[in-house]
Image (cartoon, rainbow, N blue to C red):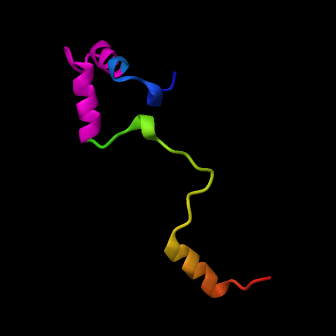
Amino acid sequence: RPISQWTAQELADEMVKQGIVASISPRHVGRLLEEATLKPHQSGYWLNPPPTLPLTRRFKTFAKPI
């Protein structure tokens, strides 16, 4: 399955398997992700990014209503 859906346990197991570390606990993996402000379980996707207020204001200055 995609790496973005791995649990802390799966990440810890893979790190040991690849020889990155001799051992690591899933909790420590979670702390490292928190420290790096990575939250793969909270990733969001859009087809289009939400509009920003300044862009909307700039658009209104040159767009005319139909």
Query: Would you say 63 lies left or right of 41 here?
Result: right
**What residue lies at 46% left-to-right and 41% top-to-bottom?**
43
Q: Residue 14 colored magenta?
A: yes
Q: Main secondary structure of the magenta part?
A: helix
Residue nearest the viewer, comparing 42 with 24: 42
Instruction: Give the magenta range.
Output: 11-35
Query: Would you say 6 lies left or right of 62 here?
Result: left
Query: Would you say 50 lies left or right of 62 here?
Result: left
Where in the figure is residue 22, as x and y percent of width and height?
A: 19, 14
**What residue lies at 44% left-to-right and 39% top-to-bottom?**
42
**Where is 62 relative to 55, above or below?**
below
The C terminus lies in which quarter of the figure?
A: bottom right
**Where is 23 relative to 52, above or below?**
above
Q: Residue 39 colored magenta?
A: no
Residue nearest the viewer, comparing 12 with 50: 50
Task: Farthest residue to the right: give it.
Answer: 66
Image quarter for residue 59? bottom right
Please count the marks in the image: 0
Residue nearest the viewer, comparing 7 with 11: 7
Task: Farthest residue to the left: give it.
Answer: 22
Where in the figure is residue 55, as x and y percent of width and height?
A: 54, 74
Where in the figure is residue 14, as x and y percent of width and height?
A: 34, 17
**Where is 24 relative to 4, above or below?**
above
Where in the figure is residue 62, as x and y percent of width and height?
A: 65, 86
**Where is 31 relative to 14, above or below?**
below
Image quarter for residue 3? top left
**What residue lies at 42% left-to-right and 24% top-to-bottom?**
6
**What residue lies at 32% left-to-right and 14% top-to-bottom?**
13
Image quarter for residue 30? top left
